[in-house]
Amino acid sequence: MTKIILIGFVIMNLVGLVIMKSDKTKAIKHQYRISEKTLWIVAILFGATGMTVGMRAFHHKTKHIQFKFGLPMLSLIEIGVLLYVIKFLS
């Protein structure tokens, strides 16, 4: 069960990283963007760590206070929940 949870966490964070890269690419090309609502949904579904890494790596959404501070805070919370669940299941 622990492996499944870890795999899900990794997958969601890869999705978060890719979605930030995709939105940055679309912004550069002046194309239709991924909505902030969608970005937050992915973040809340345990993709915040990947999105935080993507935000820093691709310099995307770094001027938006809600992303600049919200994503790292949510990421810490999600990592805490993950560690708690893994410890609880062990």
Image (cartoon, helix red, strand yellow):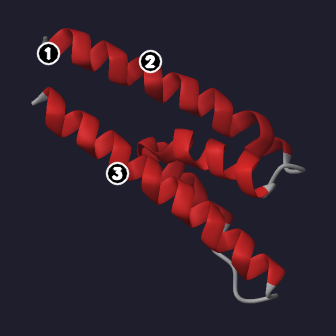
Residue 27, position as x, y percentages in the image: 79, 77
Q: Could you tell me which secondary element the residue under label 3 belongs to?
A: helix
The numbered mark at residue 49 is none
Res 67 → quadrant: top right
Q: Residues within 10 Å of mark 1 (few under 14, many from 20)?
A: few
Would you place residue 81 above or below residue 34 in this image? above
Residue under label 2, please give it: 80
Q: Sequence-wise, which precedes: disc 1 or disc 3? A: 3
Q: Residue visible at 79% across and 40% down?
A: 68
The numbered mark at residue 89 is 1
Would you place residue 58 above or below residue 6 in this image? below
Q: CA distance from mark 1 to mark 2?
A: 14 Å
Residue placed most toward the observer, 59 or 76: 59
Res 48 → quadrant: top right
At label 1, which amino acid type do we have?
Answer: Leu
Residue placed most toward the observer, 57 or 50: 57
Q: Sequence-wise, which precedes: disc 3 or disc 2? A: 3
Locate residue 46 relative to residue 75 in the image: left or right.
Answer: left
The numbered mark at residue 11 is 3
Q: CA distance from mark 3 to mark 2?
A: 17 Å
Q: Could you tell me which secondary element the residue under label 1 belongs to?
A: helix
Q: Residue visible at 16% across and 33% down?
A: 3
Is residue 38 in sight in this rendering?
no
Is residue 43 in sight in this rendering?
yes
Q: Residue visible at 64% across and 66% down?
A: 21
Would you place residue 7 above or below residue 24 in this image? above
